[in-house]
Amino acid sequence: MSASPDHNILLKVDNLGKRFGGIHALADVAFELEKGSINSLIGPNGAGKTTFINVVTGIHAADSGEIVFQAENISGLPAHVIASKGIGRTFQLEELFAGLSVMENTLVGCHTQSSSGMLACGLSLPWARKEEKRLREIAMESLTFVGLEKRANDPISKLPLGERKLVGVARALSMNPTLLMLDEPVGGLAAHEAKKLVDLIYMLVGKGLTIFIVEHNMPFVMSLSEKVIVLDEGTKIAEGPPEQVRANQEVIRAYLGDEV
Amino acid sequence: MKGHILPGLVMLAIFLLPIIVPSPYIIGVMCFIAIYGALALGKAVLMENSGIFSVAHPAWFGIGAYVTAIATIRGVPPLVSIGVAALCVACLAYIMGAPLLRLKEYYLANATFCLLIIMEIGIGNMGSLTGGHEGLMGIPPLTIGPIKFEGDRDFYFLSWGLCIGSLWFFHNLMTTRAGRALRTFMYSEVASKSMGINVSQYKLRIFVITSVMASLTGSILAFWLRFIEPAMFGIPLMIELLTMVIVGGGGILYGPILGAFTIMWLREVIQAYLARLLPVMTAEVDAVFFGIIVILTLIFMPGGIAGWVEQLMHAGRRVGERLTRP
């Protein structure tokens, strides 16, 4: 840690709470993410992991608490504004745009990096055309990074699950994010596909990105993460390096039940 | 350049038609095809590309026509009144769209349906201003400086100009940044927002843009027919436009125009030939036929005629590739 530790903090959540009706999806969640680190959020089904991503990215508004991203309070901002500040994400169920090609999906990710409006696009004004050319280069770069450049013109429906997940990653990368949140990135993937994703994640961290993973797959999480945060029924029950979390009694109880 | 040959030929044919075939009947029907085609295109851009199920299109078309007509009758230069009408429609669409577009699917369809009914009743009951249900007569001709637009052939070029211009605009839009953003709403609005797209703002903007285009179409109609009545802009037109979008294929931009072409000529054929066979030939008989056609299209050709054309061209290209391969 340097003299001013706040310089190293990319995201800080404090006292974060979210209720759906009578259910506490998140209650008093607090932790910090360091710049350039790989972090994971784990927990049993229904622990509030996806809700956490949705609240941070502004899809759901938090009921209480504060989210500070790059020293700026972003709680309560609409999702599209938060996206433009540099938080990219993927989805558990991909949420790709099925009627658009692989390239077009990735191009949508470039939205925050461009500005031509409807009239400029519709009238095909010179700067809109120039910008479109630039966006295609960015998108192609993202697709090449995940190894899908040959699939650029295919419809989404032609791709197997593993490649669809990668399109989601390429789409999020086109946003040029500082923080990349991956929601169950290896769910349903074969071992070699998961291995490829691990390589990609290390390369991204090398580029200076901060990674936040929500995942069920324990070996994947434990081998990759520098910090693991455990949620159970909306509350944080543990936080720390993987080996420490693995030994935590409360984590074992949450995963295996009281009887153990 | 290869992809531009077929559209170029079609455009050349449209341009040459009134010169080669100077039949007023054919030119008249083709004018209506351009007008309804442009309207159906706007409707398809909302429904099939942006996921906005609005049926209020005839209302913007009607208000555009009425404002243009009323202003021109009162001595406003035609070009200015077209602009005033477009501005009025833009403001109205913005004010109505801001709350209505929070609704989705059938709820939005319902609300815009009411908008359409209110507009028709409103215009019908505005007395001497709109001419009521009897319609508005005596619209001056369209003059721009020394140029006077008169007769079907002038309006043929004007209406097809607008129709093809709209197609060009929406084609550019849908293949670049802003239009791509619109096309995502049908699949996952959560993902659209997470990519940084301001969904409600985009919906409102495309709603206003398509409304203004409908208004311009209405202005052309008013100057062409020199007579308008509320029934021209009511529910039957809404259903007709929907039929054109479905039959032509709303997923591909030229589909609705193809749909307008098919439906309008089919109607002419039905009225000309079936009238001899059937003892009673009224608008209701028409409707029955179009109802059957819509159902058959949805079952056997869900992509519409344009979807079928695209499939055909795709197959053709693949055969071509195979033949040229050594």
Image (cartoon, rainbow, N blue to C red):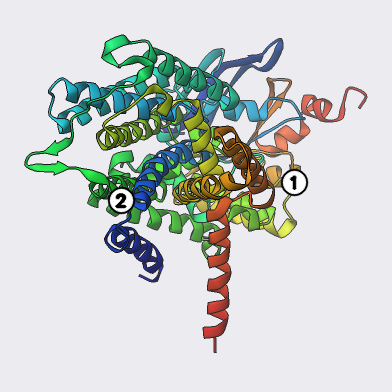
Which chain hosts label 2?
A
Type of amino acid at the residue the image marks with label 1: Pro
Query: What is the spatial separation of the Cα atoms under label 2 and label 1, in whole angstroms?
Result: 43 Å
Judge whether B240 appears above or below B81 on screen. Answer: below
Name of the residue lying farthest toward the left: B146
Residue at 18% x, 30% y: name it. Answer: B140
Residue B239 spot, x, y in % from top left: 53, 33
Residue B4 visible in the displayed image: yes
Q: Quadrant of the C terminus of chain A?
A: top right
Q: Which residue corresponds to mark 1?
A: A219
Residue B173 spot, x, y in % from top left: 37, 46
Residue A5 visible in the displayed image: no
Judge whether A194 appears above or below B20 on screen. Answer: above
Q: Write down the quadrant of residue A53 in the picture.
A: top right
Question: Where residue A131 is drawn, which disc sits there?
Answer: 2
Q: Write down the quadrant of residue A200 in the picture.
A: bottom right
Of B156 and A100, the residue lying toward us: B156
Judge whether A102 appears above or below B72 on screen. Answer: below
Indicate which label's residue lies in the foreground, 2 or 1. 2
Which chain hosts label 1?
A
Residue at 39% x, 71% y: name it. Answer: B2
In terms of secondary structure, where does tag 1 sit? helix
Residue B190 spot, x, y in % from top left: 55, 32
Badge 2 local density, few (<14 within 10 Å), some, or many (20+)? some
